[in-house]
Amino acid sequence: MTNLFSSFDPTTNFNLSLNWMSSLLGLLIIPSSFWLIPARPTLLWINIINTLHKEFKILLNTNSKGTTLLFTSVLSLILFNNFLGLFPYIFTSTSHLTLTLTLALPLWVSFMIYGWMNNTIHMLAHLVPQGTPPALMPFMVCIETISNIIRPGTLAIRLTANMIAGHLLMTLLGNTGPTLSILTMNFLIITQIILLILESAVAMIQSYVFAVLSTLYSSEVN
C-alpha cells in the first residue's frame, strides 16, 4: 500500500529536492504580455484575468485598487500546479499540505489580524448570528469560533485531498493494465481518458474554490 503514495512523497535520490521545481514550472507557461501584438493565448489569459478581477471585485465590496490581484495570483499559481501534476513524472506540489497550508495560513492570519485590530465590534458581532435565541448564544459563539479557526485547514485539506484522490484512482487503474485482456484494456483506456478530463475539470474548480473562499473570508472582515 505504501507504493501507492510514493508519487506524493517529495523526497528524491539527489541532494536537491527537484520535485518542488514543478511549483515554478508554471512561470514558463504564463504568456508574456510584452509583445507588440499579443498572441491568442495571451489575449485568452488577459480575458480570464479581467473576468476574475470583476467577479472578485463584486465579492470584496471594496473600492481599493489592486486587492483582487492577490487572489487572482493565488488562483493562477494553484491552477498551473494542478495542471502540471497531470503530466507524467511531474510531482504535484498542490497534493502536499506543505504548499497548500503555506498559501492558506498567511491569508487567514492576515485577515484575522486586520479584522480584530480595525473592526473589533464587527468581528465580535459575527460570532452571534442575527436572530439567535439568548439561551443558544454561548453555544453559537463556540461553534462560530471553531468554524473560524478551522478555515485554513479546510482550505488546505480540500485542495490536497481532491488532488490526491484523482491521481490515486488513475494510478490504481493504470496498475491493473498489464493483467487485463485486449478487450478490457480498451475499456480501461476509455475510463482513463474520462478520468483525465475529470481531473482537468477538478484542477480548474479547486483553484477557483480556493480563491473564491479566500475572497469571501477577506470580505467578512471589512
Image (cartoon, rainbow, N blue to C red):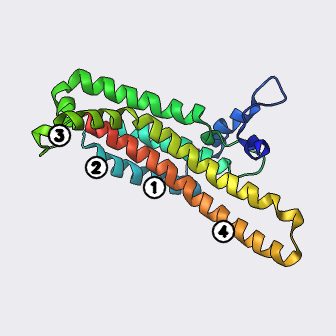
180 vs 116: above or below = below
Q: Earlier in the sequence, mark 3 or mark 2?
A: 2
Please tell me whether mark 4 sits on a helix, a strand or a loop.
helix
Q: Circle 4: is it few (<14), some (14-19), or many (20+) Cα within 10 Å? A: few
Out of 178 and 13, give the one closest to the viewer.
178
What is the C-alpha distance between the residues marked 3 and 1?
48 Å
Picture coordinates of residue 58 (x, y %)? 28, 49
Q: Which residue is mark 4?
A: 194
* Residue that carries the numbered disc 1 in the rendered image: 47
Q: Position of residue 154 (x, y in %)?
A: 45, 41
Residue 56 appears in view: yes
Label 3 amino acid? Answer: Leu
CA gap between label 3 and label 4 equals 48 Å
Query: Looking at the image, which residue is at 28% across and 37% down?
Result: 144
Secondary structure, mark 2, is: helix
Q: Quadrant of the C terminus?
A: top left
**Residue highlighted by disc 2:** 58
Q: CA distance from mark 3 to mark 2?
A: 33 Å
